[in-house]
Amino acid sequence: MLKITVRRDKDGKIVTYSAAGHCNYNEPGKDIVCSATSALLQTAVLGVYKERVDAKACIKRGGLKIDLPDDMKLKEKAKFQIIFEAIFLGLKEIEKQYPANVSITEVFEKEVEEEKVEIKE
C-alpha cells in the first residue's frame, strides 16, 4: 500500500507531502494507481522547484517527500497552496477509488503556546 502523509500548519496550509510504499495494484510498469499518484506528487515537487529552490525534496523509488520552508512568507505560501490543494483533491479521489492501494493521513499542527515560567533566584 502507498501511504501518503499530508502535514498542515496551524493555519491549515499544506507544508509537507510524504509518500512511502507501493500501490501494488498491478505489476511494475502496468500499475495505473502508482502512475497516477506519482504524477501528482512529482508535480508538487516540480511546482515548488520552479518557483523556490530552497524547499527540501527527495524522490526515490517507492518514496517521496517535499517540505516547504518554515520561513516562507504568507503570500508565497498562498501561491503554493493552489498547487498543493489541487494535488490533494486528486490524491483523495484516487484513495476513494482504490482504498486497498492508497491511504492518506492528514496531520494538523497545533499552535503551541510557550509557557511562561518565572525563575526565582
Image (cartoon, rainbow, N blue to C red):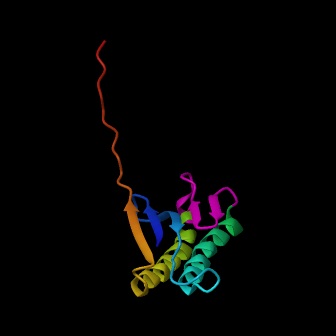
Q: Residue at x 53, y 52 (%)?
A: 70
Instruction: Residue at 42%, 71% (x, y): give it.
Output: 104
Could you tell me which residue is drawn at 48 percent across and 79 percent down?
A: 91
> Is 65 or 103 nearer to us in this picture?
103
In the visual, does 16 lie left or right of 60? left
Q: Nearer the viewer, residue 48 or 74?
A: 48
10 horizontally vs 61: left or right: left
Above or below: residue 16 compared with residue 93? above
Identify whether 113 is placed above or below 60: above
Q: Residue 34 placed where, x, y %?
A: 56, 79
Instruction: Establish if 84 lies above or below 99.
Output: above
Residue at 57% in and 84% down: 31
Q: Quadrant of residue 93?
A: bottom left
Query: Measured from the top left, where is residue 62 in percent x and y?
Result: 59, 67
- Classify the position of the C terminus by image quarter: top left
Residue closer to the observer: 43 or 105: 105
Which region of the structure is painted magenta? 53-76
Figure check: 37 above or below 61: below
x%, y% of residue 43?
63, 75
Query: Residue 57 magenta-drawn?
Result: yes
Residue furthest to the front = 27
Dividing the picture into quarters, in which one does residue 106 lie?
bottom left
Q: Is residue 25 magenta?
A: no
Direction top: furthest residue: 121
Q: How many marks?
A: 0
Q: Is residue 47 left or right of residue 23?
A: right
User: Where does the image place residue 18, in percent across and percent down from the top left?
Assistant: 52, 64
